[in-house]
Image (cartoon, rainbow, N blue to C red):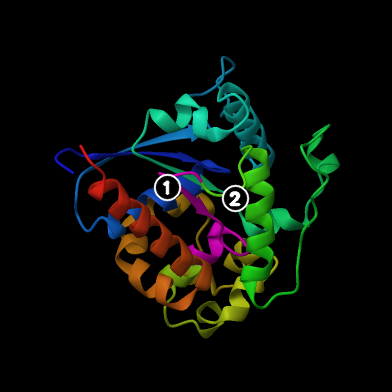
Amino acid sequence: MSRSCRIAAVVEGRTDSIVLKAIIRSLLDGADFEFQTLQPESSVSFRGRPRPAGWSRVYRWSRQAAEEGGGSLSGSSALSQWDLLIIHLDADVADKTYASARIQSPPQNDLPCKKSCPPPRHTTDALRTVLLGWLGEQTCPPRTVLCTPSKTMDAWVLTAIFPDNTTFQTENWECHRNPAGQLKALPQEKRFSKSDYCKRQDEIRQAWRGVSTTLTEAARFRDEFLETLANLENRPQ
């Protein structure tokens, strides 16, 4: 492309956006890009509090985008205004129910959709179908990339930060129910909180190649992102 790629993201929370931006920096190998988080909004509410986050906000954003697009994301300005749209949903959402998030009248009663793990893909395939349903789609629209870390984005972060920790380097790690909880299990001198993810961005960027070689859902995101980017670059101007 003759200009910077314009990328928007819909994610569960602020730290997911931080990690995703570091990953994109690695995938683009130093190329300039614009990045905007559509959900959660980067601004704060009128009371000075962070905007609501979580998987239910991804659901509500998806339904609003589909409605605005005449029934599907494909017709929405949320897609037309950006070169590439990334929609993130952690695999642990497959364990949830709509009622737990106070969601009434979903398009389908398709949660929970958890499958046996390993392999992680059985669950993430089912969850992607659910997510596409929220968007009013049967297949992923052009210029859209789904990001479904298993079980959460925290699994990718820990694999990046601790490449010598064998627990974080196996497929079974993608089936761990609470990756973030393992932060507290680390030796005291190695512990950090999710609020420190911003400080760790460069480490995540540098380690991404190893993460995407080790973890199957990271590899899936890498491959689908690069394929979508290539299609974007090859389209007629």
Does 44 sit above or below residue 167?
above
Residue 17 in picture, x, y percent from top left: 46, 45
In the image, 32: left or right of 192? left
**What's the residue at 57%, 22% (across, down)?**
68
Front residue of 207/131: it is 131
- Mark 2 lies on residue: 89
Front residue of 5/150: it is 5
Does 95 sit above or below residue 171?
above
**What's the residue at 54%, 58% (across, down)?**
153
Residue 148 in picture, x, y percent from top left: 56, 57
Per the rendered image, the range of residues in magenta is 141-157
Q: Quadrant of residue 237?
A: top left
User: Which of the labelled discs sits on residue 167, or is there none?
Assistant: none
Q: Amino acid at mark 2?
A: Leu
Q: Amino acid at mark 1?
A: Ile
- Mark 1 lies on residue: 18
Q: What whole-number distance in Å separates the C-alpha atoms at marks 1 and 2?
A: 15 Å
Q: SS for tag 1?
A: helix
Say if residue 174 shows up in the picture: yes
Q: Furthest-left residue in view?
A: 2
Q: Quadrant of residue 211?
A: bottom left
Q: SS for tag 2?
A: loop
In the image, 177: left or right of 147? right
In the image, 128: left or right of 88? right
Q: Furthest-front residue in view?
A: 236
| Crowd band around label 2 with a 10 angstrom C-alpha radius: few (<14), some (14–19), many (20+) | many
Does 113 sit above or below residue 54?
below
Residue 95 in picture, x, y percent from top left: 77, 57
